Image (spheres, rainbow, N blue to C red):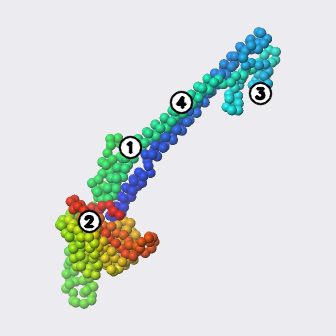
Amino acid sequence: MRDFFRLRLRAAAAAGSAGIRTGLRWKLSAAIALVGALVAVALSLVVHNAARVSMLDNARDLADERVLVAQRNYELSGRLNFPNTRIDDPDLPEELRRKVEAGRRATYVADRPGGATEIWAAVPLTDGHVMSLHTGFTDRSSDILSDLDQALVIGSIAVVLGGSALGVLIGGHLSRRLRKAAAAAHRVAGGEPDVRVRDAIGGVVRDETDDLASAVDAMADALQQRLEAERRVTADIAHELRTPVTGLLTAAELLPPGRPSELVQDRAEALRTLVEDVLEVARLDGASERAELQDIVLGDFVTRRVAARDPRARVRVVHESEVTTDPRRLERVLSNLLANAARHGRPPVEVSVEGRVIRVRDHGPGFPEELLADGPSRFRTGSRDRAGRGHGLGLTIAAGQARVLGARLTFRNVRPPGASGEEPAEGAAAVLWLPEHAPTNTGSHPLPRLP
């Protein structure tokens, strides 16, 4: 159950981290820049078209006034004396011609190939002919439109750049808050119960990030309470079992000699060992354990302890060193690793000491993938066939004691060089990395499992 809650916390932290890795700052900046570009382009097109239509309307009104003046002059003098006017111009647009023949004065805008714009104005004469005025869109108007388009382009670029900068600022602020929240959630998942995500992100302005942080804090508090309640129940049950188990073991020793008595004594002893292991796990979970430090010569210490625990194991001291640690807890870790290698692996068991690093290797089928992925878990044995040998507490206790020592304990399978992960392992290796400096405030709360 505890491992389930721990995985829930890790999943929450991983979910936050995933959100961060997508590049929220740049996504938000790109989104604002895209929206700004679309708005700028749309407004530019509207402004350009509105300005062009207004200029064309002014040009048509001017052409209409000129053709009226030309009509009056022609009817008074009988000759054309106004520039760009013609009588019955064959190039007169057909649509304009039909309107004039219907007795209407009209103007017309024609777009010629090449982008040239022409303004036509026509009026019917009293003699039945058609007078028309033909002019082009003035260069001054074209220059005004060109200047307007240039200003619109510069404005659009400024809007896009400003939107991008605003997106970077807003996204950067939100990204920093989320990164802080993710880092704090990782610390909570790693077993630091005093960390609060809301305090980690800080800030004065309240937003959805604060809601997320408060929810994670509430979840962490609830899980911590449940874990503490579970630990207390486990410790109470194990403590209450010590007295009857001790009595059972004493009674078993009073039985008449024989095979049945030996079986009863063996099972009673196994039960007592299990109860003691459960009590030790409960103490380690309580985060109250502290190391009692001494200076020891590591290679000599390991050699003597291994010889006493498993004389068949091979010990090799590559590089001797003096360390400051808790000898009792270190011996406990070493004994559990040797017991696990003897129970689930195959001989020979090899122990090497190189500086502050202790390696325990067997030549069995290797650790199961679940242990390599999630670390040791109680009541999940290292045996692939789960044949009933052990309760999975040995490696759990070893990992807990290593944390009290300020050390880290890693597990891996040994394969030939260049072999893929699909090939069978040639053995299992547990590596204990003792700290360079003596631990001062370690405790036994769960810490992130390092590779």
For the C terminus, the quadrant is bottom left
- Image coordinates of residue 334 in percent, x first then y, are 26, 72
- State the residue at coordinates (38%, 49%): 178
Find disc 3 in the rendering and name its residue: 94
Q: Nearer the viewer, residue 387 or 450?
A: 450
- State the residue at coordinates (56%, 28%): 148
Distance from the alpha carbon under mark 1 to that under mark 3: 65 Å
Distance from the alpha carbon under mark 1 to that under mark 4: 33 Å
Q: Is residue 323 visible?
A: yes
Find disc 4 in the rendering and name its residue: 151
- Image coordinates of residue 5 in percent, x first then y, are 34, 61
Find disc 2 in the rendering and name its residue: 434
Q: Is residue 286 left or right of residue 375?
A: left
Distance from the alpha carbon under mark 2 to that under mark 1: 40 Å
Tell me if residue 113 comes above or below residue 442 in the rendering.
above
Look at discs 1 and 4 and give the one toward the viewer: 4
Question: Label 2's element?
Answer: loop
Q: Is residue 226 visible?
A: no
Distance from the alpha carbon under mark 3 to that under mark 2: 98 Å
- State the residue at coordinates (43%, 45%): 25
- State the residue at coordinates (32%, 45%): 202
> Residue 262: which quarter of the image?
bottom left
Residue furthest right as drawn: 127
Q: Amino acid at mark 1?
A: His
Look at discs 2 and 1 and give the one toward the viewer: 2
- Image coordinates of residue 102 in percent, x first then y, are 78, 22
- Image coordinates of residue 59 in percent, x first then y, are 65, 22
Q: Nearer the viewer, residue 139 or 387?
A: 139
